[in-house]
Image (cartoon, rainbow, N blue to C red):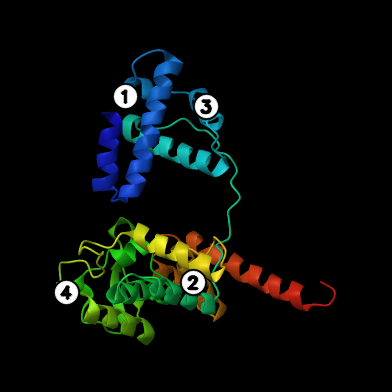
Amino acid sequence: MLAADWGKHLALDRRRSAHTVRAYVATAHRLIAFLGQHRGQAVDAALLAALEPADLRAFLAARRGDGIGNLSAARELSAVRGFLRHVAGDAPRLRGPRVKRGVPRPVAPADAVALAEEAAEDASLPWIAARDLAVLLLLYGSGLRVGEAVGLTGAVLPLGDAIRVTGKRGKTRIVPLLPRVREAIEDYLAQSPWGAARDMPLFRGARGGPLSADIVRRAVRGARGRLGLSGSATPHALRHSFATHLLGRGVDLRSLQELLGHASLSSTQVYTSVDAAHLMDVYRNAHPRA
């Protein structure tokens, strides 16, 4: 009951994604089950309010025993803290595991376009080919998350130089629409058998329902395998490419933050590391003494 109530709070009040809600509620259930054995008593709000740092350390140690790494442990602790704050008003202070922040690996411009075209080539029907090409070019050309792209509706029509996108936590932003991307979407719409009503999904699945993000990911996995690209070439990597290529052309971080829909500038600053990494690669490959 406590975990379910927290899930409703996350979904309705915090407007977290369904994926986040499922993951966080699962963590709450794991904590409750662990404490039931660890404390040998029923777990209620009073018990959760009386937890000590040692209890959380014991829980994390048990999760370590399940084989999770630093990143998963840090996420687990973050979810536990949120759950305890919701139920008990506070959470014991406990330093989380150190997590080395990874630098996103962008896809080269030519590879991004090739990935989109290859995914389209493997489609079963011409309209699905046009759809896959349009979605992947949209991820790369406008920096959308895959969930944002498949969540678009016919309300974005008619297409202009930009579209309004609803991102995480219901935050909306305006993103540019390149002529090449606009043409790809219009070509898909001209071939789609499902139309594009204002309140219906813009991108449809084979049977007319909303296009699943998993379908997009599956198409990219097949395409990158046939092209010989690394496993880092994912739909989300196309968003990274959008960001790093703009940053390399001189776009300031604040503007990039708005285009990506990041809540904080610190989320955007990781792309400065990407650009620096690229410069170091160029140096190492070109300098005779490197």
In this view, the residue farthest toward the top is 40
**In the image, which is nearer the foreground, mark 1 or mark 2?**
2
Q: Position of residue 228 (x, y in %)?
A: 57, 68
Do residues under tags 3 and 1 come within 8 Å of each other at their CB atoms? no
Of the two numbered discs 2 and 3 on the same chain, state the one appearing first in sequence.
Answer: 3
Task: Describe the element under mark 4 as helix, strand or loop.
Answer: loop
Q: Position of residue 111 (x, y in %)?
A: 53, 75
Which is more toward the observer, 160 or 140? 140
Is 150 left, or right, of 37 in this rendering?
Answer: left
**In the image, which is nearer the foreground, mark 4 or mark 2?**
4
**From where the camera sits, is residue 98 visible?**
yes
Task: Describe the element under mark 2 as helix, strand or loop.
Answer: helix
Is 61 left, or right, of 30 in this rendering?
Answer: right
Q: CA distance from mark 2 to mark 3?
A: 39 Å
Amino acid type, residue under disc 1 in the picture: Ala
Q: CA distance from mark 1 to mark 4?
A: 51 Å
- Tell me the number on the disc at residue 195: 4
- Which residue, given by chain and number where applicable, does mark 3 sit on? 62
Q: Residue at x 53, y 79 (%)?
A: 110
Q: CA distance from mark 1 to mark 2?
A: 44 Å
- Which residue, given by chain and number where applicable, does mark 2 sit on? 243
Give the quadrant of the N terminus: top left
Q: CA distance from mark 3 to mark 1?
A: 22 Å
Task: Describe the element under mark 3 as helix, strand or loop.
Answer: helix
